[in-house]
Amino acid sequence: MAFRSDPTGDQFFALRTFRADGSAVTTPVWLAPAGGHWYCYTPGRSWKVRRIRARPQVEVARSDFHGIPSGPFTTGRARVLTGKELRIARRALAKKYGMKFRVFTVIMLLTRFRRSMGPAVGLQITLTADLGT
């Protein structure tokens, strides 16, 4: 697997997941590199998590705030992290995003009891090639 850290410091990435019928859904996310993988932090009951549990194939591209890609998509596989593995994702994201990520985790904690949110989970994404620059 090819892997490169994030030297450009891009803030947002477009994460493309796939429905059961094969149609793609693109969502803007924060991603941080660590140990040869990319990590994301998201509500456990979000649709992207449900789609990844059903079909782990994903595509990732650098993007703007709205998830509009600014480069080519790179294919990969994602898996949902919980428990002790979640620490790796939180550390990587805290290192990259600093105070913004800490505020985000507080918001996630406060909203976890909403039906649509649930407890936060991490996503570990393993790409087949480097993200395009």
Image: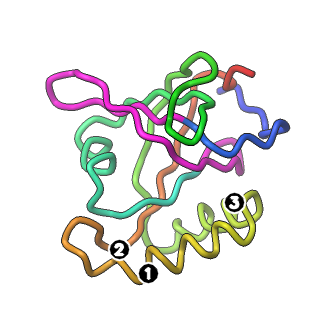
Q: Earlier in the sequence, mark 1 or mark 3?
A: 3
Which image quadrant: the N terminus?
top right
Image height check: is 20 above or below 122? Answer: above
Q: Looking at the picture, how far across and down is residue 91, in whole percent? A: 68, 67
Q: How many marks?
A: 3
Circle 3 residue: 92
Left/right placement of residue 54 relative to residue 80 reads: left
Q: Looking at the picture, how far across and down is residue 124, in whole percent? A: 52, 49
Find out whether residue 20 is within the magenta segment. yes
Left/right placement of residue 33 relative to residue 121 reads: right
Please give the name of the residue rendered at 33% of the width and 77% of the height, measured from the top-left corner. 112
Tag 3, which secondary structure?
helix
Q: Nearer the viewer, mark 2 or mark 1?
A: 1
Q: Which mark is residue 109?
A: 1
Q: Looking at the picture, how far across and down is residue 87, in whole percent? A: 59, 70
Q: Which mark is residue 39?
A: none
What kind of colouring is applied to the model shown?
rainbow
Q: CA distance from mark 2 to mark 1?
A: 7 Å
- Depth check: give the residue in front, 100 or 122: 100
Q: Which mark is residue 119?
A: 2
Which image quadrant: the C terminus?
top right
Kind of residue indicated by mark 3: Ala
- Depth check: give the residue in front, 20 or 8: 8
Kind of residue indicated by mark 1: Leu
